[in-house]
Amino acid sequence: MFFSIIIPLYNRPQEIKELLETLVLQTYRDFEVLVIEDGSVNDAEAIVNSFAGQLQLRYFKKPNEGQGFTRNFGFERAKGDYFIIFDSDCLIPANYLEIVNNSLATNYLDAYGGPDGAHASFTPTQKAISYSMTSPFTTGGIRGNKKAIGQFHPRSFNMGVSRQVWEKAGGFIITRLGEDIEYSIRIHSMGFKIGLIPDAVVYHKRRTNFSQFYKQLHFFGRARINIYKFFPKELKMVHFFPAAFTMFVLLTFITNLFGWQISKLFNLLLAVYILLIFFHAWLKNKSAKIAFLSIIAALTQLIAYGIGFMQDFWKRVIFNRS
């Protein structure tokens, strides 16, 4: 099978350098790489071209449209039997394509997704963020998990679709705000087979500080409401958890501010939750520092998502504004 790897890029020259360095090391060699510069001011043309002798590589520049439509630009020009999309902030294990090729040969999927994890080179903050996004104590536990609730939806940081999917379903119809989930649901609704390849792991850097992480998760919360507008039945109870948690934290603050007796119960519940995160993160990462940072990451994730979710739920569902 010949793979086309499609990577949208926006003002991240150093990230694409590190990503391409990992693709050079792939044990499975039947693939091409398409890097599409999406209206970047700080472009990576020189960096990408430096890999020309090591990879089957094509580089494009286009006006800024967002990641969804930029992937479509790559689909239209890809030569492969199967298209794989990565975010530019990913590192790819050397046996990734070999794992995907063997898995598809054994149990063919029209579209697949894979999990993400933290690389040893990541900073403690990045490892804490990675923990939070994959932890069973946050909504991240449903990502890249065999036991996910409902139909599995591949995410665009680590996702593949066959040429047949592209030819029948087309590409992304929205460019941001949950474009990958909408695409996954639409592919599934057309009868294609979608699944998780558990061993097709990528190392996803995500954000390097908590301020950036907050903005990203606030955006994710809004994106869930955008998906609801396309597919109302896809809004599950688990998606309300961050909003409920955010309201609980606010209520805890208020009860402590006014000295209400029930504040003791709220404080206890919050303390137990924080301790669960701390010790689980410590067990996973073997580091007290990362465990402490994981508390900050988890609270940031849930509150940012919850605020974004409530903001657009109120605006777009209650008041039905676009």
Image: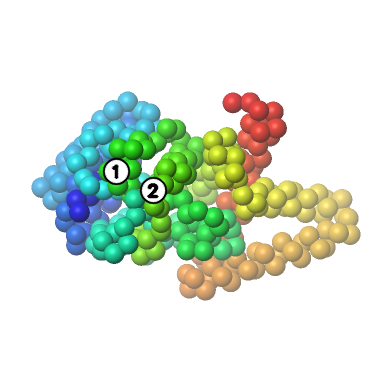
Calculate the distance from the C-alpha at mark 1 to the C-alpha at mark 2: 9 Å
Tell me, yes or no, whether the two marked residues, 1 and 2, touch with CB atoms within 8 Å.
Answer: yes
Quarter of the figure that contains the C terminus: top right
Percent across and percent down for residue 209 are 49, 49
Placement of 319 over or under 59, stated as above or below = above
For label 2, the SS is: loop
Sort mark 2 into few (<14), some (14-19) or many (20+) by Cα contacts within 10 Å: some
Q: Is residue 172 above or below residue 144?
A: above
Q: Is residue 213 above or below residue 318?
A: below
Label 1: which residue? 164
| Residue at 29% across, 43% down | 164
Secondary structure type for disc 1: helix
- Count up the numbered dots: 2
Q: Amino acid at mark 1?
A: Gln
Q: Amino acid at mark 2?
A: Phe
Quadrant that contains the N terminus = bottom left
The disc placed on residue 35 is none
Residue at the spot 42% in from the left edge and 43% down from the top edge: 190
Residue located beneath label 2 in the image: 192
